[in-house]
Amino acid sequence: MTTANLQASGLRFSPEAGYLSGMPTRAWFSTFIYHEPLLCAGQARFNTELAAECRNLRDYDAAGRRWSAKNYPGGYTSYASLNQLHKFSSTFAGLERKLTAHVRRFAAQLDMDLRGRTIAMTDFWVNIMPEHAAHSLHLHPLSFLSGTYYVSTPRGCPGLKFEDPRLSKFMAAPPKTTGVRPANQPHITYPAKAGHVILFESWLRHEVAANRIMTARISLSFNYNWS
Ligand SMILES: [Fe+2]
């Protein structure tokens, strides 16, 4: 049934579909975030080996460590050095195939028409965040969908915090009520969960707060583009 038909029928949408329960107000222009396990099971051992591979990359990547010292204080990222890992490592190439299936599913949920078009992973890099390392608010230019796969997420490590993309337009808005509905929150933080993939549109700003525990948080980030 189409939206117009539903309205004509007098039926109410569920709150999840956009209507506020019992109210004449409906949500539009939604922002979607995708969060799923990469696979159904069997990721723990794979992630242990993957974490070791990430540490090896850091030890090998002198240029990346130098770049990180200036731009990623306290942590290591291969963002500016080894940033197409799917083209150089069979482990990462295998991950790319699995991630692409999730990206296609997310794109379908966004009603993106990719028939006759191709999507491709353009960047794939490692992030290692020891104690005190943080990643300030940013977005992912030159791509349409981006995401992160979590490799090692020790208890208490920071999650991924997203910002309402309209925040800069709320010039005269009063504060939110204490019981603000999830859809009206100005921020949402997804806990980092090893074995899970999180996807978002590349323009959506996000950050990772400082890691307050002594164990490093390890993740892989990636971008996709289409043609
Ligand atoms: Fe990011």
Image (cartoon, rainbow, N blue to C red):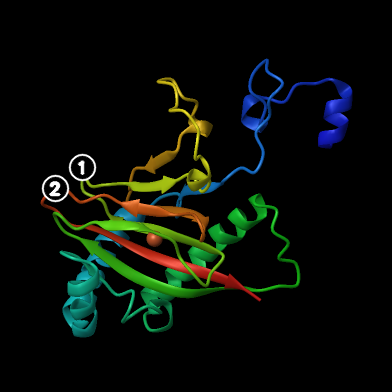
In this view, 20 is above or below 133: above
Q: Specify whether residue 195 is in view.
A: no
Q: Residue furthest left?
A: 214
Picture coordinates of residue 100 (x, y %)? 54, 65
Identify the residue at the far front of this view.
Answer: 172
The percent position of residue 134, horizontal first and vertical second, equals 23, 56
Task: Indicate the quadrant containing the C terminus: top left, top right, bottom left or bottom right.
Answer: bottom right
Instruction: Say which element carries label 2.
Output: loop
Task: Classify mark 2: residues with Cα within 10 Å, few (<14), some (14-19) or many (20+).
Answer: some
Above or below, 5 relative to 199: above
Could you tell me residue 79's position as x and y percent?
33, 74
- Going by the numbered disc 1, the residue's amino acid type is Gly
| Ligand 1 quarter of the rendering | bottom left
Picture quadrant where residue 91 is located: bottom left
The disc placed on residue 156 is 1
- Along the horizontal axis of the image, is 117 left or right of 194? right
Q: Left or right: 160 with respect to 37?
A: left
Vertical order, 180 against 125 (above or below)? above
> Residue at position x 40%, y 20% from top?
178
Ligand 1 has an atom within 8 Å of the beta carbon of the residue at disc 1: no
**Number of callouts in the render?**
2
- Kindly identify which numbered label has been placed on residue 81: none
177 and 61: which is toward the camera: 177
Which residue is found at the position 47% from the left and 47% from the top? Answer: 35
Is 4 left or right of 68, judged from the image as shown?
Answer: right
Q: Are marks 1 and 2 in contact (CB under 8 Å)?
A: yes
- The residue that appears at 21% across and 48% down in the rendered structure is 154
Res 213 label: 2
Residue 55 visible in the current orientation: yes
